[in-house]
Amino acid sequence: MKKLVLSTLLTAATIANAGQITALNSDIELSGGLTTGYFYSTNTGTSNHDDFKVSNFIISLSSQPKDRGIGFTTMFGSILLPTLYDGGITDSKAILNKNFGVLSGYLTYLPFENVSVDVGLLTTNIGYEIATSYANPNITYGSVFYAQPFIYPGVRVTYSYKDFKFYGEVNKDKGYLNGSSSLPTSGAYAVGTLGSLYGINYALSYYDYIAYKNLIDLVLSKSLNQNLDIALNIDYQRLDNTAKQQGHDKYGYGIAFYIIPKFENISIPVRVEYIKDGSKGKESGIYNSVASGYSFTITPTFKPSKNTFIRVETSYFKTDNKVFQDKSGNPKDSKLSGAVELGLLF
């Protein structure tokens, strides 16, 4: 998957356990995972569905291109996509697009040495958290993730030089995250670079939703030792003049800090976030109409074996304005969510 830093986690979590299939003249890698759990959250209004759910059922197939040839990457299945806003309980079907199907898929062509071209349904380079939640340190996705691009049709050209990559892309991102065409944009383009500098993994990207907003995203991560990983994801976003509502602010930013202590087969991932999007009553809407807020998420995780896990999560989300509702419809400015999840990677 394409969100830079955690793509290494995804590789470790899936490809390391992947099987290999020989089909005609291609070697195809098979990987994936199944996760199930119980999700609970307060102040989600009258649409609460506290319940046991399938949070991920993913099958990935890929074949790496060789000798300036063409390879492919595809992912199909279903994803719950629980966020801090809903706790994963507002969709009783609990799957992306409400059905089982292709989530992403693209062909990779190598026309020249160190140059690759990806065409199809792309996964984004933006942000720290990635599409398959079992490869993320936390179960729920953060509010910073919520405001980032996700999966979209497009074309991306990448140039590699030593430990660095430089890319440019054009796409038709109109809100594939929720299976709708809800984003007020005619498409998007992005440029960026990712790699490793002075022992720190980085990703710096500029993403322009045409006729909507602009996003500058920075991700930094580092393993301090075998027992501690840290990461920082910073977003700065600005609405275009055509998208700004009269009397509302047009700027917003979000900061997410991750710290992951690890002890043999136990880890305790922690995520702390802060978002700021104007003043009360003048929010741009970049962060789901939240003027400002902070969250704390902790996810103790136990791995009985290298390809299985059990994790328990608690998250607290506090906002300056009352964007949540209790079961009676009364406005609230905080939310408490919890989840227990079991996972098997293959």
Image (cartoon, rainbow, N blue to C red):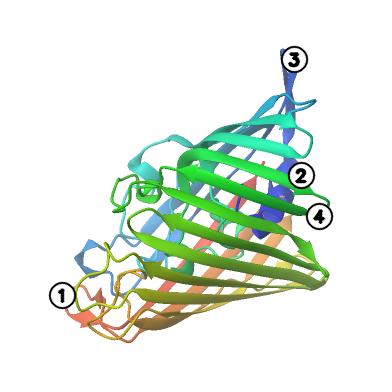
* 52 relative to 325 in the view: left or right: right
Disc on the earlier residue, 3 or 4: 3
* 25 relative to 187 in the view: left or right: right
Q: Residue 12, which numbered label?
A: none
- State the residue in front, 317 or 199: 199
3D distance between C-alphas at marks 3 and 1: 61 Å
Disc on the earlier residue, 3 or 1: 3
Q: Which residue is mark 3?
A: 25
Q: Residue 328, which numbered label?
A: 1
- State the residue in front, 214 or 70: 214
Disc on the earlier residue, 3 or 2: 2
Query: Where residue 311 appears, x then y in whole percent?
Result: 59, 64
Q: Quick check: can you spot residue 270?
A: yes
Q: Amino acid at mark 1?
A: Ser
Disc on the earlier residue, 4 or 2: 2
Q: Which residue is mark 2?
A: 16
